[in-house]
Amino acid sequence: MRRGQLINNPKKEISLDFTRERIIDALRSVSVVNEKYSVLKDDKVLNIIVLKKKGIVDIMNHFEFQFSFEEVSKNKTKMTIECSRFIGAFDTAGEITEATLFMDTILDAISVLLSEETIEEALSKVLSDKKEKQDKWIADTTPSAEAIKTGNIIIWVFAAAMVALCIYIIN
């Protein structure tokens, strides 16, 4: 594939054993599971949700993910995901690979949200897990009182050595 040759937007179609409303509720909450994605557009009339990937500095690599839904039966919904660039079009296979990986990340987040009996239970579990990880990180990175004393002694010794060095250089 040559650079400059336009490639169709990548699409994925997946059938889920959930109602359309439940899937849409999960999509609206994807940013709780993965902060890199947020809802850009939520059109209830046309039955379309658009997510965007946040945190990319280069505007040329901004991606949007459009979700459309088709009810197959009472508890089965066909969801189509189409990824497009915010500006321009895909012109390398690497961009398609990157977009496909982003779609998989979103599907993983949806899976987490649909894994519990209700979206609220899933959100509660996700937030609880995040809090546990944050508390563990704080506990692991907060120095003990003994480490603080040792650190202060090292700083004082270093400062004294720097003063002695300055006095030696001046004399």
Image (spheres, helix red, strand yellow):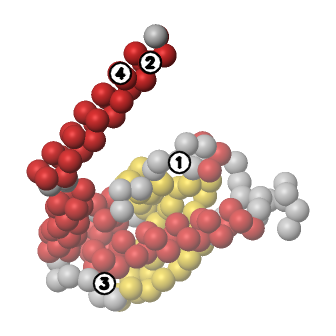
Q: Is residue 9 above or below residue 157?
A: below
Q: Are marks 3 and 2 in contact (CB under 8 Å)?
A: no
Q: Nearer the viewer, mark 2 or mark 4?
A: 2
Q: Position of residue 166 (x, y in %)?
A: 42, 18
**Residue 8 vertical placement versus 74 (above, below):** above
Distance between mark 3 and mark 2 Cα atoms? 77 Å
Residue 89 sits in quarter:
bottom right
Q: Nearer the viewer, residue 99 or 164?
A: 164
Few, some or many residues within 10 Å of mark 2 (<14, 14–19, 20+): few
Q: Which residue is mark 4?
A: 163
Q: Disc number at residue 168?
A: 2
Residue 103 in view in this figure: yes
Q: CA distance from mark 1 to mark 3?
A: 32 Å
Discs 2, 4 touching: Cβ within 8 Å: no
- Residue at image mark 3: 18
Point out residue 95 in the picture as x, y percentages from the top left corner. Answer: 68, 62
Q: CB atoms at circles 2 and 1 under 8 Å apart?
A: no
In the image, residue 74 sits, relative to residue 43, either above or below, namely below
Whether residue 45 is visible, yes or no, is no
Image coordinates for residue 45, horizontal then vertical, percent: 37, 58
- Rendered location of residue 141, percent (x, y): 24, 56
Q: Nearer the viewer, mark 1 or mark 4?
A: 4
| Residue type marked 1 | Ile
User: SS at mark 2?
Assistant: helix
Q: Earlier in the sequence, mark 3 or mark 2?
A: 3
